[in-house]
Image (tube, helix red, strand yellow):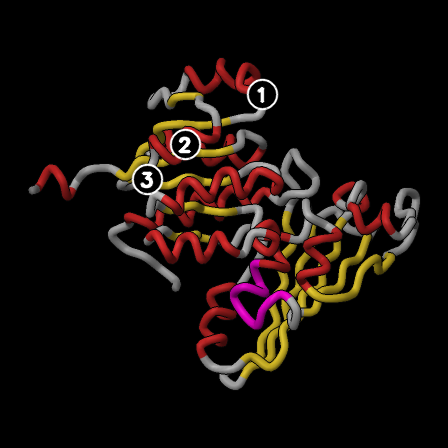
């Protein structure tokens, strides 16, 4: 019995970009109760060298095999791959940690799939702040929730919303509001940028009632998110300024958030809801 209680939970990482690489290395260095067993990447040959040097020597496998070899699969991949990563995991009653939260709005049945099979989808804080407070307030009644995002121009270039509306942001010299609307529409128009909006909406009052403003701002060097929530238990506002990672669309804190989330899973002391 003692051996079973100490058995480590097997973890796999899908996607080895800036975030996935950091998460895989942290798991290899050691997280209580967890062991890295597999990783998956779009270009596996590019990663074979450093993956082979890890202490745990995880298998480099296609994404469709991750659900078979792991108990928890961490999705750090492009949003178009979310369904192919998450569905096999939750169908087996296992756990998927999802970073491309915006994709859940296009694949809402994944939550039903998890419920039917005893699986779980976990959404870390990612680049956002205060989701604990939002989920607590949502136990009562939230009257309104708003997110204002400001990003350097480089972090927004190429977003579908800009192309569809012929909005030019290269070369702007002062802040320009490029979107105002619901979290659902923000996620569609900025799929690589607005996972934060969807995470806030799922924690609170949903993607259609959560309001979002997005600003392209040549005066900032950090991805900045401000939340404003009014509820029957508290009124609060929070702001975070994230230093971009090697990928300008993603903050460095996102990978750290995933690592912190994984540490909570089997930790002897767990802080925060």
What residue would you read off at disc 2? 66
Which is nearer the eye, 119 or 116?
116
* Position of the N terminus by quadrant: top left
Q: How far apart are labels 2 and 3 at the CA level? A: 9 Å
Q: Are marks 2 and 3 in contact (CB under 8 Å)?
A: no
Asked which quadrant contains residue 31, the reply is top left
Q: Position of residue 35 (x, y in %)?
A: 31, 33
Which is nearer the eye, 111 or 4?
111
Residue drawn at (28%, 41%) of the image:
32
Residue drawn at (17%, 40%) of the image:
6
Most distant residue in the bottom direction: 232
Question: Image check: 168 left or right of 244?
Answer: right
Q: How far apart are labels 1 and 2 at the CA level? A: 16 Å
Nearer the observer, disc 1 or disc 2? 2
Q: Position of residue 268 (x, y in %)?
A: 24, 52
Question: Image check: 43 left or right of 271?
Answer: right
Per the image, label 2 sits on a secondary structure element best described as: helix
Q: Position of residue 263 (x, y in %)?
A: 36, 46
* Position of the C terminus by quadrant: bottom left
Q: Earlier in the sequence, mark 2 or mark 3?
A: 2
**Disc 2: CA contacts within 10 A as few (<14), some (14-19) or many (>=20):** many
What residue would you read off at disc 1? 43
Q: How far apart are labels 1 and 3 at the CA level? A: 24 Å
Asked which quadrant contains residue 240, the reply is bottom right
What residue would you read off at disc 3? 71
**Residue range (magenta):** 199-207
Per the image, label 3 sits on a secondary structure element best described as: loop
Residue drawn at (61%, 42%) of the image:
79
Q: Earlier in the sequence, mark 1 or mark 3?
A: 1
**Disc 1: CA contacts within 10 A as few (<14), some (14-19) or many (>=20):** few
Q: Are marks 1 and 2 in contact (CB under 8 Å)?
A: no
């Amino acid at each position: 019995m003692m051996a079973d209680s100490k058995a480590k939970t097997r973890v796999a990482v899908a996607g080895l970009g800036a975030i996935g690489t950091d998460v895989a290395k942290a798991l290899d260095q050691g997280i209580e109760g967890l062991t890295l067993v597999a990783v998956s990447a779009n270009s596996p040959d590019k990663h074979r060298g450093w993956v082979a040097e890890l202490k745990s020597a995880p298998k480099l496998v296609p994404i469709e095999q991750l659900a078979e070899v792991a108990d928890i699969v961490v999705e750090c991949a492009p949003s178009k791959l979310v369904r192919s990563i998450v569905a096999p995991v939750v169908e087996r009653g296992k756990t998927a940690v999802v970073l491309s939260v915006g994709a859940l709005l296009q694949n809402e049945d994944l939550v039903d799939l998890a419920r039917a099979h005893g699986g779980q989808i976990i959404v870390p804080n990612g680049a956002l702040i205060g989701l604990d407070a939002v989920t607590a307030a949502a136990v009562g009644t939230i009257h309104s929730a708003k997110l204002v995002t400001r990003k350097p121009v480089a972090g927004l270039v190429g977003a579908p919303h800009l192309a569809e509306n012929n909005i030019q942001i290269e070369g702007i010299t002062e802040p320009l509001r490029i979107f105002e609307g619901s979290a659902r529409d923000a996620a569609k128009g900025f799929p690589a940028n607005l996972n934060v909006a969807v995470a806030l909406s799922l924690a609170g009052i949903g993607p259609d009632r959560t309001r979002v403003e997005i600003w392209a701002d040549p005066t900032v060097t950090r991805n900045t998110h401000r939340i404003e929530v009014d509820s029957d238990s508290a009124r609060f506002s929070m702001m975070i300024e994230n230093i971009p990672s090697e990928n300008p669309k993603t903050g460095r804190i996102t990978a750290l958030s995933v690592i912190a989330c994984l540490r909570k899973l089997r930790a002897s002391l767990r802080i925060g809801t």
